[in-house]
Image (cartoon, helix red, strand yellow):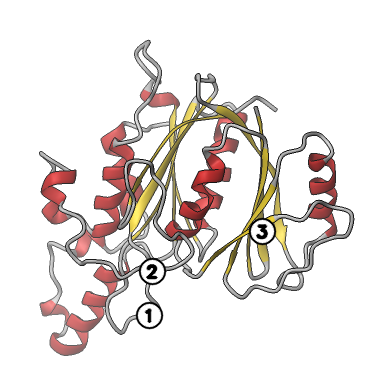
Amino acid sequence: MSAVNLLTCAAVAPGIGEDLLPCSPGTLAIVDPDWFDPALWLPGTRHRYLNDTTRYALAAARRCPDPCTDGGVAPERLALCFGTSVADVSVRHLFDQAVAHGGLDAVSTVSAPNISANIAAAHVAIDCQARALCSTVTSPFLAGFEALMLGIQAIQAGRADQSLVIAAEEAIPEGAGAAILPGAVALRLGRRATENGHCLRPLGWGRVETPGQLPQRLVHALTRAASGFPGPTRLVVPARTPLSWPKGLPPPDILTCDDAGALAPLLCALPTLRDVHPFILVAIHEHRYMAFVSQC
């Protein structure tokens, strides 16, 4: 398969500095409700009519530019792959409350266009002129990694020359569910290697019959990959996940993340994804896994 390189990345989330490293990636810190100023992050944009997931995703995408200096990728060759767990949850919650207390006449027509899990990806694709592909994947914990897999495959299949991969979440309304870290991460992938870029490819994906028990297919892939270079294997898993690691394989570095959203797990993996040295990265959630390998 053709090589896919991680070109640039950006993160917009509470506690994330210029180095893109979270203060404590495994836990959800107390989030100041005013941590994001749309006027500062999105100047000139009519952000008033956008939901929070869209605002965060746009801000991250604009901070993840094309590093090529020869005019960049053509819009017809740029794919947008978006991962989220809750997407438009705040709008849907407000709509439920409005209908329950005031009927259909109480529903806001201004907010109505935002009641779609796909709306954030659509806005970012329009803003970035990504016309090769625009797709949204939704699942707890793994959605960001699924979007990353889709972005790699879009390039490998020849559908795009670059992929803009985004994981974004908005805060859950009080009483509507477990807390989720709000914000967005953007990764730009491309065919052409840059000075600081490195090759990234899928190693495997599938189901885990028993949580924490790696399937034979993944064990075989890990064994083959581990024999090719001395790089570390890093696992991103929810906190308190039981793990049974195969004998004979070097023990992995385990990164735990107590957050079911798509953003926090990808933030945990971001230092690994930015590492220019070889690595194996595996994300596991309940009965599913995604695995990647990087080779310089």
- Give the Cα separation between the discs numbered 2 and 3: 21 Å
Name the amino acid type tagged 3. Tyr
- Give the Cα separation between the discs numbered 1 and 2: 9 Å
Q: Secondary structure at mark 3?
A: strand
Across and down, in percent, residue 105 comes to 11, 78
Q: Which residue is mark 1?
A: 177
Q: Which residue is mark 3?
A: 289
Q: Residue furthest right?
A: 248
Mark 2 and mark 3 lie on one chain; the one further toward the N terminus is 2
Q: Are marks 1 and 2 in contact (CB under 8 Å)?
A: yes
Query: Which residue occupies 12% across, 40% down?
Result: 43
Q: Residue furthest top?
A: 70
Q: Are marks 2 and 3 in contact (CB under 8 Å)?
A: no
On the rendered image, what quadrant is the C terminus found in? top right
Q: Residues within 10 Å of mark 3 (few under 14, many from 20)?
A: many
Across and down, in percent, residue 31 comes to 28, 67
Q: Say which of marks 2 and 3 sits in front.
A: 2
Q: Which residue is mark 2?
A: 180
Tell me if 220 is positioned left or right of 75 in this view.
Answer: right
- Look at the picture and state if 104 lies above or below 113: below
Relative to the observer, which residue lies in front, 33 or 286?
A: 33
Numbered mark located on residue 116 in the image: none
Across and down, in percent, residue 46 comes to 11, 46
Query: Which residue occupies 55% across, 51% down?
Result: 146
Marker count (numbered): 3
Query: Which residue occupies 41% across, 25% down?
Result: 76
Q: Residue furthest bottom?
A: 101
